[in-house]
Image (tube, rainbow, N blue to C red):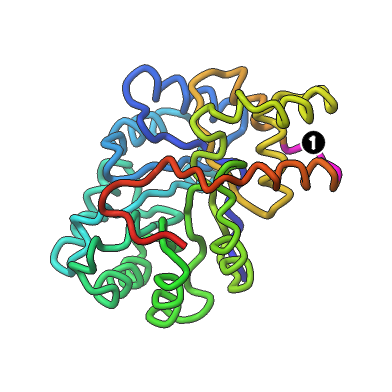
């Protein structure tokens, strides 16, 4: 049975201090239970403090974190996960991801996927997954981990980067797609086609995009610090787009990628 990833989740990339506090407290109050972080975000400790004092029982939360590529070696992997858990003030995460495949394969995939499996075996993670993996890398990861072991691949998906080949491969192989930067860091708000669709449904552009992603079977983790936006993002899941709107959004795909560090793999 596939574990359901709560949709939507709260993304916390680049959030720290008062912005992070506002985002997490407001999101939890509105009913969000999925909080997404990563070692490289350097906010696990703050999130741990906020969750510990939130009054929300740990069993209700779904916490995701990601192992940074400098911690992928056998010696560093498990200790780094234990450090993340200490910061998050929890005995386990609900989902542990490889944040990026090892640049230039400095660490063999067999080594870090085996450590990912070991983390779950040790009870440090309930579910395991990957992030920013290409189709070729996913095929190798499935071969190493076994079919049905990888819960999700977290990748950039928005109207201007629809990542269709990767999404289709995941969905054929029962891997959930988690889409980060679903609003293209605000660039969707400038698009005339999305504005027309939003006006037709008396919705916001952000709601249209999130509804489209949900109807595409994708889990989203938008980031917001404002209660009104967080509430609006939740309300997007009540919106149902007809096929003609879906078709219009599909026409916006421009292979416009935002997250492209110099160590990224060669994209599909």
Residue at image point 51% right, 26% down: 224
Density class for disc 1 (Cα within 10 Å; few <14, some 14-19, many ≥20) is some
Task: Identify the image quadrant of the N terminus.
Answer: bottom right
As drawn, which residue projects farthest toward the left? 75
Q: Residue 66: within the magenta?
A: no
- Front in this rendered view, residue 136 or 235: 136
Seen in the picture, residue 5 relative to 256 is either above or below; the reply is below
Asked whether 229 or 259 is in front, the reply is 259
When asked about the image quadrant of residue 44, the answer is top left
Residue 257: where, in percent of width, then height? 46, 44
Q: Which stretch did the figure color magenta? A: 237-242
**Could you tell me which secondary element the residue under label 1 belongs to?**
loop
* Prevailing secondary structure class for the magenta stretch in the rendered image: loop
Q: Is residue 241 left or right of residue 18?
A: right
Q: Position of residue 46 (x, y in %)?
A: 31, 30
Rendered residue at 72%/40% (across/down):
211
């Amino acid at each position: 049975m596939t574990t359901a990833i709560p949709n939507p989740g709260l993304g916390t990339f680049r959030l720290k201090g008062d912005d992070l506090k506002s985002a997490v407290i407001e999101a939890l109050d509105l009913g969000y239970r999925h909080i997404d972080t990563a070692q490289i975000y350097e906010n696990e400790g703050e999130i741990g403090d906020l969750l510990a004092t939130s009054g929300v029982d740990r069993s209700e939360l779904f916490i995701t974190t990601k192992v940074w590529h400098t911690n992928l070696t056998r010696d560093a992997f498990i200790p780094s996960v234990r450090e993340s858990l200490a910061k998050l003030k929890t005995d386990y995460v609900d989902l542990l991801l490889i944040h990026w495949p090892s640049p230039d394969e400095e660490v063999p995939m067999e080594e870090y996927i085996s450590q990912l499996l070991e983390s779950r075996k040790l009870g440090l993670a309930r579910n395991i997954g990957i992030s920013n993996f290409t189709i070729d890398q996913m095929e190798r990861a499935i071969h190493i981990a076994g079919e049905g072991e990888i819960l999700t691949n977290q990748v950039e998906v928005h109207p201007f980067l629809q990542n269709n080949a990767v999404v289709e491969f995941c969905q054929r192989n029962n891997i959930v797609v988690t889409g980060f930067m679903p609003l293209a860091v605000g660039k969707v708000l400038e698009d005339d086609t999305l504005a027309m669709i939003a006006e037709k449904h008396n919705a916001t552009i952000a709601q249209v995009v999130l509804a489209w992603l949900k109807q595409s079977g994708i889990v989203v983790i938008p980031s917001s610090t404002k209660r009104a936006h967080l509430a609006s993002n939740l309300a997007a899941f009540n919106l149902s787009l007809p096929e003609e709107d879906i078709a219009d959004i599909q026409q916006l795909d421009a292979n416009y990628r935002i997250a492209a560090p110099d160590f990224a793999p060669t994209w599909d």
